[in-house]
Image: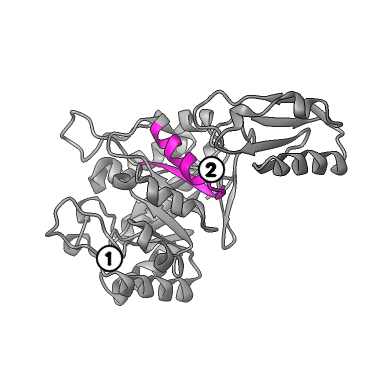
């Protein structure tokens, strides 16, 4: 449920409604727009709330039931776009954010070289995997905490915030000591224990769409994080599994505007996993920006032919720099900056 305050509701009237909600045992999300203040009620049993409880209070214009199953993620819950601040980098606003770096952290030298290069090209956030979920148990699984230390060193050297994947609730505390953004991979989109644990954290969560996940399932997974009180969630379209074997996945360009229609959360596109081919990353990245994506996640490696994972979909440093120049033109055409 949301409580819509009147246009000229006083701070005292708003605070009275907030106190009433909290006295009933619910959490609130306050959204102050140009014309209205909207108070979202967060709780497992919000359908039990009596609308008359709030509609008789001074300053309240109306109450509205959120009909979507994803209550807090719904556009009804927060009509203005959510903007997440990560060490001074806004995600979800006018500026298009680019997260770039290797699939896996392989060495100190590799991640430092890549970090400096992607920053020079204009990237805002450094990506790199220290813990890697792989289809085969015999594939490289990541450097673990050693990789996290290298990422932290790269952040110190470049000033770029870092994003890295977390796979288990048991790893949240350790990874939280290093990362600026928790990444939840496609294989863990419906790892509800992990999502609940991240919902209790104060750092943003980057949630990828599952291998065959529907839009509703993605937003319901986001709801698990949001319902625990962590409102800093962004969702990522990274391609889904279809009958087409020519590409690694089928990138769902429809998902970008649809997610923005249904939800207030920032929407990021991952054209590397969406295609699996470096030659397709640039065209799909441009399409995603044109479709309204709030950001991109792009895999970059100094020598993709020698990458320990996902080399086929990684851009070289020179190709990434060229793509960034091209993306600036697309961003400007759709009213964004890069």
Between disc 1 and disc 2, whose residue precedes?
2
State the residue at coordinates (85%, 39%). 13
Tag shown at residue 227: 2
What x and y, as percent, mark residue 279? 25, 45
Which is more foreground, mark 1 or mark 2?
2
State the residue at coordinates (39%, 51%). 194
What x and y, as percent, mark residue 149? 37, 75
Q: Residues within 10 Å of mark 1 (few under 14, many from 20)?
A: some
Q: How many marks?
A: 2
Tag shown at residue 302: 1
Instruction: Look at the image and say whether residue 12 sits in the magenta stretch.
Output: no
**Quadrant housing the N terminus:** top right
Residue 91 vs residue 155: left or right?
A: right
Magenta stretch in the rendered image:
217-237
- Circle 2: element type: helix
State the residue at coordinates (46%, 76%). 157
Q: CA distance from mark 1 to mark 2?
A: 40 Å
State the residue at coordinates (34%, 41%). 238
* Residue 165 visible, this orientation: no
Outermost residue on the left side: it is 138
Image: 135 above or below 17: below
State which quadrant residue 59 falls in.
Answer: top right
């Amino acid at each position: 449920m949301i409580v819509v305050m009147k246009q000229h509701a006083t701070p005292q009237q708003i605070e009275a409604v907030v106190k009433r909600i909290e006295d009933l045992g619910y959490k609130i999300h306050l959204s102050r727009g140009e014309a209205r203040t909207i108070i979202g009620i967060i709780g497992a049993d919000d359908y039990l709330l009596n609308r008359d409880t709030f509609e008789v209070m001074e300053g309240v214009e109306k109450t509205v039931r959120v009909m979507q199953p994803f209550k807090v993620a719904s556009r009804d819950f927060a009509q203005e776009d959510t903007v997440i601040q990560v060490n001074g980098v806004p995600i979800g606003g006018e500026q298009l954010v680019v997260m770039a770096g290797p699939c896996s952290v392989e060495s100190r030298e590799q991640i430092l070289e890549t970090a400096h290069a992607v920053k020079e090209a204009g990237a805002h956030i450094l990506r790199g995997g220290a813990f890697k979920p792989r289809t085969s148990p015999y594939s490289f699984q990541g450097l673990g905490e050693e990789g996290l230390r290298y990422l932290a060193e790269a952040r110190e050297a470049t000033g770029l915030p870092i994003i890295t994947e977390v796979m288990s609730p048991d790893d949240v505390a350790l990874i939280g000591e290093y990362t600026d953004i928790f990444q939840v991979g496609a294989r863990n989109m419906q790892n509800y224990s992990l999502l609940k644990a991240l919902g209790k954290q104060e750092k943003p969560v980057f949630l990828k769409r599952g291998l065959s996940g529907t839009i509703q399932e993605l937003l319901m997974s986001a709801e698990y994080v949001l319902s625990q009180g962590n409102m800093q969630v962004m969702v990522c379209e990274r391609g889904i599994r279809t009958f087409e074997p020519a590409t690694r996945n089928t990138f769902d360009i429809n998902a970008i505007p649809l997610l923005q229609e249904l939800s207030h959360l920032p929407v990021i596109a991952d054209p590397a996993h969406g295609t699996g081919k470096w030659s397709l990353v640039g065209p799909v990245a441009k399409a995603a920006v044109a479709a309204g994506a709030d950001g991109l996640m792009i895999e970059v490696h100094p020598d993709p032919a020698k990458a320990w994972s996902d080399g086929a979909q990684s851009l070289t440093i020179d190709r990434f720099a060229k793509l960034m120049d091209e993306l600036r033109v697309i961003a400007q055409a759709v009213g964004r900056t890069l």
